[in-house]
Amino acid sequence: MTQFQNKTGLFPAYDVRLLFAVLSLVGIGIVMVYSASSAVALKKFSSDAFFLKRQAVFAGLGIVVLVVCSHIPFRLYRSLTYPILVLALGLLCAVHISAWGVSAGGSLRWLRVGPVTFQPVETARLALIIYLAYSLNKKEASIRIFSIGFMPHLLILLLFSIPLMLQPDFGSVVIFAVLTWLMMFVAGVRLRHLMSVFLLLVPAGCFLMLGATYRIKRLISFLDPWQYPAGEGYQIIHSMMAFGTGGWWGAGIGKGYQKLFYLPEPHTDFVFAVIGEEMGFWGVVLILGLYGMVLWRGFRIVSGCSDHFGMLLAAGIMFALALQVSINMGVCLGLLPTKGLTLPFLSYGGTSLLLNMAGIGILMNIGMHHARRA
């Protein structure tokens, strides 16, 4: 592991390559958020730097969060598992039962407390990872028993899924389900138990997907977006047009056209499309390379961790990050149905950035622990 440690030993070792990749993504994100949002910000807030300033503040706070979390012993989260779990579930429920819930775009997914607006689902994802790591580690000796290693974790997943479906946020339910499945698989839950869940969840998922008109339209438009150029296929079409316009070298930072009120949410859900248009093929390769470095260093920490709880916690953080990146990029490239999901470290959004930076901080602490033992 490539590390930096001061000679006095007062500060822990840092994985330089992991830190470099994350900070590079955050830096590129600040630039691209400004480029993607300047026209929208000028129209809505009479300042083209509105989102730039906020993202820069989020980035600064995110770096502080990363450093703080990298110094907190990861084993401490075991004793905090249930308070964190209750807090996350409470925030998800507060969206529906409190006056703080905020609706936008037909979905009730935000909480607004004074001047602060955030998405509880980001907190819930990290809380679910911590709970699963704690519970799967605690039940390691009996993990292959159906009633111990499988059912309790499925019930917690269902507990998270209910308020998410009421928002509605079907995409996050799918992410949570895949994340839970992967962590149970890594922990050693019997494969036949894991496969049995498909007998229940796949029909339920199909029913939920086909039970809402907007989801049916979204699925149909994904299969052939050009039949609905002014409707459900609009986002996918303009996203693919952005990549096509970018070519090898891109139109240049700030010179893209799709962000000029053609591509919806260019600074959040579709910032990757703006990158494709303005930075071109090689810019996309750069972004993929940086994410690849983050995932490589992260899974190196997973494979080298001798602490079972730490290994599961690190694996959960990396699985969540990989899922977010894959789904967001897949949507922007027209490979997956449209899902409102930010691109980690690059998209505009304080909640997403802060929680992802916290996850990297926790991951680095796990890596530091392994480095000290090595």
Image (spheres, rainbow, N blue to C red):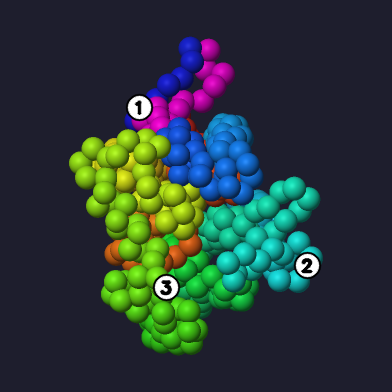
Give the labeled residue for mark 2: 98
Tag 3 or tag 1, which sits nearer the N-term? 1
Graded by Cα atoms within 10 Å as few (under 14), some (14 to 19) or many (20 or more), the crowding at tag 2 reads few
Query: How far apart are the alpha carbons under marks 3 and 2?
Result: 33 Å
Helix, strand or loop at label 2? It is: loop
| 227 is higher (above) or lower (below) than 331 | below
Is-magenta flag for residue 20? yes
Residue 231: which disc?
Answer: 3
Three-letter amino acid code at the position of disc 1: Thr
Query: How far apart are the alpha carbons under marks 1 and 3?
Result: 49 Å
Tag 2 or tag 3, which sits nearer the N-term? 2
Q: Is residue 77 left or right of residue 99?
A: left
**Residue 343: percent from left, percent from top:** 44, 50
Three-letter amino acid code at the position of disc 2: Ser
Query: How far apart are the alpha carbons under marks 1 and 2?
Result: 47 Å
**Residue 326: percent from left, percent from top:** 35, 56
Residue 2: which disc?
Answer: 1
Quadrant, the C terminus? top left
Graded by Cα atoms within 10 Å as few (under 14), some (14 to 19) or many (20 or more), the crowding at tag 3 reads few
Tag 2 or tag 1, which sits nearer the N-term? 1
Query: 142 or 33, which lies in front?
Result: 33
The stretch in magenta equals 8-25
Q: Residue furthest top?
A: 7
